[in-house]
Image (cartoon, coloured by chain):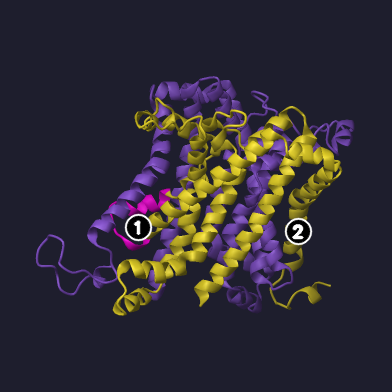
Chain colours: A yellow, B purple
Amino acid sequence: MTLALRQPSVIPGFGITLGFTLFYLGLILLIPIGAFLLYTAQMSWADFWQAVSHRQVVASYKLSFGASLIAALLNLVFGAIVAWVLVRYRFFGKRVIDALVDLPFAMPTAVAGIALVTLYASTGWVGQYLEILGLRVAYTQLGVVVALTYIGLPFVVRTVQPVLEDLDRELEEASAILGANRLTTLRRVILPALLPALLTGFALAFARALGEYGSVIFIAGNLPFRTEITPLLIVAKAEQYDYPGAAAIGTVMLLAAFVLLLLINALQWWTARHTRR
Amino acid sequence: MSSLASPIPPLSSEAPAWQRATEEPAWIRRLLIGIALTFLGLFLVLPLAVVLYGAFEQGLQVWYAAITEPDALAAIRLTLLVVAIVVPLNLAFGVMAAWAIAKFEFRGKSVLITLIDLPFAISPVVVGLIFVILLGSQGWLGPWLAEHDLRIIFAVPGIIIVIAFGTMPFVARELIPLMQQQGKEEEESSLTLGANGWQTFWRVTLPNIKWGVIYGVILCNARAMGEFGAVAIVSGRIRGETNTMPLHIEVLYNEYLFTAAFAVSSLLAGLAIVTIAVKSLVEWRDERQRHQAAA
């Protein structure tokens, strides 16, 4: 049976490795997700709709999607600049800074959360100066954006960096010889080549931000209708044993995640095709 | 870079009258470096500094007392127990998945790779909820589990399951591209020369992927220790029993015990730093090997 599914090879272990992979994926991932979706499917449409369209829940979607979008846009702009600087320029401490970019990926979200709220509170190292400028970050929607920017930071940098390293300098030279100034070269030659990677990084940062919980709840203050993110509402409902309500909202989040994952796969496929040419 | 610099050195140390057409003016370069460093300083360096400052502000003794207090020790012990189970499981999964994907051609491979990525995309909170609904007392398997006196949700097994779910992709994600890039010629020669599958794996494949395995394990370990959202839902937050380190940090913070919260945080922050240091080391080794191979 396996012979029909795969090309023949002298290397052993296909059956056992693929078998274990599928068993583990099935047991931990697919069966639980399937059961979860079935659980939601058993709700009546009216109950489901009431749970997912409650005013407080809709306010949380707006915040979660809006703040994730702003955070991903910030990461798009600053991530592109960081990637550019790390690939093209030489400066003191570059190696350490390059390594530090991965920190949000390795740092526990709860630790990031209490660090950010301490930093940006009105008495914090940064917050006290922002206060003078009239900017309040902690316990506002801006705080949510700050936390989501933090956790999404590595994505754009790490997707753009390798593409930029492989980018053919001769294209830029040709563009310059043909009379384009640096800005035109950037706009017409460099940015189009980076576009798939930029979009992939943006989508990854957005997807990560959308489901984030730990780093946000400390800095957000969690005021209903104002600074409540959707994952927080799921936790709140689960803690009150309102499982159907939590499952309905969780299903919305899960479907959004599936759509984003498909989009990211398509973007990565596009990036791979783009770089191979 | 230096070989690409201008063939004619500028006459004065001030800005040269001309510049290479594929370079930006010096002031733009400085501006961009300045923007990048400010952004990274605000978002990466300062949060890390605030954790370390908060942890050690009142001296080493206070820090030590905070991490050796009974509830903190219980959280540390539970966290270590969880990773001792989860990391080997996900290591085995990662190596097997990478072997199947990198060494064989079969139908549905790209679907399989997408499935392995799935836990990255799902909110940790939803992960926790999925298992509460499946295994909790109100859940589908709840009555059966209660009948057999098995407690999973609001107990240690639930924590292990959700962390295994959340950190499943890390080793696999590290090894799949590495093993795909290395191809299968070396394994094929080894097998042709009479080695069996195990010998080939231990003596040929493993030495080639050793550093990828090390980084994958360390990253998986760091993320497993730091997992928060999913654990927050399934643990029930029983102090001294089902609080992992991140949950303990949350409890301390909410009780305004900031120094203690930062002290426990500093352990996890230290682990995060070790993780990115190992990653840099692995990449630095690869780079050097590639340079040597090219030379």
Report if residue B203 is visible in the image. no
Of all chains, the one bearing label 1 is: A
Q: In this view, does B259 lie above or below A270?
A: above
Q: Main secondary structure of the magenta part?
A: helix
Do the residues indicated by labels 1 and 2 lie within the same chain of the protein?
yes
- According to the picture, the residue beneath numbered tag 2 turns out to be A22
Q: Label for residue A188? A: none
- Tell me the amino acid under the disc marked 2: Leu
Helix, strand or loop at disc 2? helix
Question: On the rendered structure, is A192 left or right of B248?
Answer: left
Question: On the rendered structure, is B97 left or right of A187?
Answer: right
Read off the magenta span: A86-100
Percent position (x, y) of residue A83? 40, 58
Instruction: Please tell me which residue lies in front, A42 or A67.
Output: A67
Percent position (x, y) of residue A233? 67, 34
Instruction: Please tell me which residue lies in front, A184 or B163.
Output: A184
Of all chains, the one bearing label 2 is: A
Name the residue at the left extreme: B12
Q: Residue at x 88, y 33 (%)?
A: B143
Q: Residue at x 48, y 55 (%)?
A: A156
Q: Residues within 10 Å of mark 2 (few under 14, many from 20)?
A: some
| Residue A88 covered by magenta stretch | yes
Q: In which quarter of the image is the C terminus of chain B?
A: bottom left
- Please say if the residues under marks 1 and 2 sit with CB atoms less than 8 Å apart: no
- According to the picture, the residue beneath numbered tag 1 turns out to be A85
Q: Residues within 10 Å of mark 1 (few under 14, many from 20)?
A: many
| Residue A142 covered by magenta stretch | no
Pointer 1 or 2: first along the chain? 2
Q: In this view, does B252 lie above or below A12?
A: above
Report if residue B79 is visible in the image. yes
